[in-house]
Image: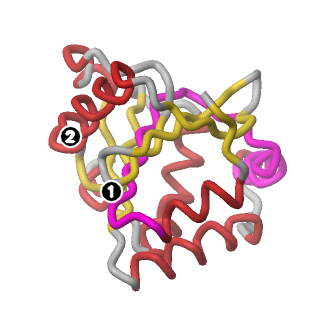
């Protein structure tokens, strides 16, 4: 596996027509989210300026015809961090992402891979790395691992609930 810089990662969205993000972690501990999460928990207004670079990229590529999809596999009832992500998902949807949620108990039989991923055009697999915190991305070219994600992602997508319905039913 080779490390992927943030610039290289963002360039993948411009080179591919489909980007699928599978999220399976209970928390992400992203340094940029520390203060916004604390403010969210305190019921205070949250400045989401730190998200503008990513959301701008998503607006750009979806306007150009790229499909960006995300499934969050969550434990219910939602923990505080998952509630925070549900709150900020509105920005993702408004930017053009198709966001869905899948309750973890409804995914048990899918034998999901442990690592979060971005799967571009069903062939380029980028795994998210964690060392207590989200630390970056690596490109995985192991055929067995790639195949496992290629098989799991469509199953998760089909079973997941669209964001608007999931929020409405909460």
Q: Earlier in the sequence, mark 1 or mark 2?
A: 2
Side of 34 relative to 140 (left or right): right
The residue that label 1 is drawn on is: 163
* 109 relative to 91, above or below: above
* 26 relative to 54, above or below: above
* 168 relative to 29, above or below: below
Q: Which mark is residue 154?
A: 2
Mark 1 nearby-residue class (10 Å; few <14, some 14–19, many ≥20): many
Please tell me which residue is depicted at 78% across the width and 53% down the height of the picture: 39
* Whole-percent x, y for residue 89 in the image: 49, 59
Say which quarter of the image contains residue 119.
Answer: top left
Relative to the observer, which residue lies in front, 121 or 86? 121
Q: Does the magenta portion include 53?
A: no
CA gap between label 1 and label 2 equals 17 Å
User: Mark 1: which secondary structure?
Assistant: helix
* Whole-percent x, y for residue 47 in the image: 76, 68
Q: Select label 1 or label 2 by which is in front.
A: 2
Relative to the observer, which residue lies in front, 79 or 108? 108
Relative to the observer, which residue lies in front, 10 or 96? 10
User: Mark 2: which secondary structure?
Assistant: helix
Please tell me which residue is depicted at 60% across the width and 77% down the height of the picture: 56
* Whole-percent x, y for residue 9 in the image: 61, 55
Kindly indicate whether the residue at mark 2 contacts the one at mark 1 (C-beta within 8 angstroms). no
| Residue bounds of the magenta highlight | 15-40
* Whole-percent x, y for residue 50 in the image: 76, 65
Side of 107 relative to 120 (left or right): left
Say which quarter of the image contains residue 29.
Answer: top right
Please tell me which residue is depicted at 64% across the width and 39% down the height of the picture: 137
Quadrant in which the N terminus is drawn:
top right
Please tell me which residue is depicted at 42% across the width and 45% down the height of the picture: 124
């Amino acid at each position: 596996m080779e490390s992927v810089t943030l610039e290289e990662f963002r360039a993948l969205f411009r080179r591919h027509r489909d980007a699928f993000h599978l999220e399976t972690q209970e928390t992400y501990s992203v340094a940029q989210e520390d203060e916004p999460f604390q403010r969210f928990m305190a019921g205070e207004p949250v400045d989401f300026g730190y998200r503008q670079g990513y959301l701008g990229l998503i607006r750009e590529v979806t306007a150009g015809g790229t499909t960006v999809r995300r499934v969050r596999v969550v434990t219910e009832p939602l923990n505080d961090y998952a509630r925070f992500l549900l709150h900020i998902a509105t920005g993702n949807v408004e930017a053009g992402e198709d966001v869905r949620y899948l309750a973890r108990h409804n995914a048990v039989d899918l034998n999901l891979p442990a690592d979060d991923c971005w799967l571009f055009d069903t062939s380029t697999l980028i795994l998210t790395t964690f060392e207590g915190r989200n630390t970056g991305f690596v490109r995985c070219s192991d055929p067995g691992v790639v195949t496992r994600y290629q098989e799991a992602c469509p199953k998760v997508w089909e079973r997941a609930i669209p964001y608007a319905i999931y929020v409405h039913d909460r």
